[in-house]
Amino acid sequence: MKLPIAVQLYSLRESMQNDAEGTLAALKNMGYDGVEFAGFYGKSAKELRDICDRIGLVPLSAHMVYPEMRDNIDARIEDFVTLGLKYVVISYMQLEFHKGGIDHEGVYENIKSISAKLRANGIQLCYHNHNFELCETYGERVLDCLFEAMTDDELQSEIDTAWIELEVGEAEQYIRRFKNRCDLVHIKSYYTRDGFDELEHDPTCRKRRDTFEFCNFKKGVLDMPRIVNAAKESGAKWLVVEQDTKDPELADLESAKINIDVLRALE
């Protein structure tokens, strides 16, 4: 089974800001099927939809941080519908909003309400994890608490494989745990900086940022065949490529080409 592949445009933020249409055309030529937005790069939703339609890319999803989504979802839904998005993703929700945090009260109710508004417009809400949701900050993994509080329709996962593997070494297992609840799987990798042991996973303590770096899939340590197989077997509908950190020796489009070539070689 061949899964369609999208790319999170944060990975190409410099190129998108300089030449959005040229960047999207280049991604299509590389073989990407869709894109996930992280901002609109000075263009309207209609302009971006027209570009995607002309080029032949699926405008798959968009990221929004939780506070912005909580405060502005009504104003943004029209843009999302204009773009033709299938998914909108909570890209980041600070620890204080999670169970046990000082600003947790009402958060789950807000997410349920946001999800209902999106579903009424044919859009599924998802949640994209970082590292801290996997750490036992309050004696339990707050990512698990969040999903246990929601139905499958209310909230789908967008598993970020690098963050999970980095913190607890369980990316493949987490994908399988979310079987049929993981339409989108973020494919991302990292390498460990010299002097640090990548195999020391401690769920009680987050990895220091100076111990690792995100990178393209040729440099990274993640076992891509196993990750992709787990995604396929768990009902994923899209793989979404992300590379948070630009390679100092490569243009962001060069890294994007490496990443899709690695994934396509697995099929």
Image (cartoon, grey):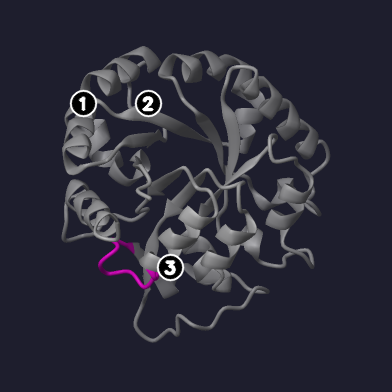
- Residue neighbourhood size for the residue with mark 3, other residues' Cα within 10 Å, grouped as few (<14), some (14–19), many (≥20): few
In the image, residue 232 lies in the stretch drawn in magenta: no
In the foreground, 97 or 264: 264
Q: Amino acid at mark 1?
A: Glu
Tag shown at residue 226 = 3
Q: Are marks 3 and 1 in contact (CB under 8 Å)?
A: no
Q: CA distance from mark 1 to mark 2?
A: 12 Å
Q: Earlier in the sequence, mark 3 or mark 1?
A: 1
147 left or right of 122?
Answer: right
Residue located at (72% from left, 56% from top): 144
Above or below, 81 against 91 in this view is above
Single out the mark in the foreground, 1 or 2. 1
Q: CA distance from mark 3 to mark 1?
A: 34 Å
Q: Quadrant of residue 215?
A: bottom left
Q: Position of residue 160 (x, y in %)?
A: 50, 55
Q: Earlier in the sequence, mark 3 or mark 2?
A: 2
Q: Amino acid at mark 3?
A: Arg
In the foreground, 253 or 57: 57
Above or below, 5 against 229 in this view is above
The magenta region covers 215-223
Above or below, 260 against 174 in this view is above
Residue located at (21% from left, 60% from top): 248
Single out the mark in the foreground, 3 or 2. 3
Q: Secondary structure at mark 2?
A: loop
Tag shown at residue 21 = 1
Q: Secondary structure at mark 3?
A: helix
141 left or right of 179?
Answer: right
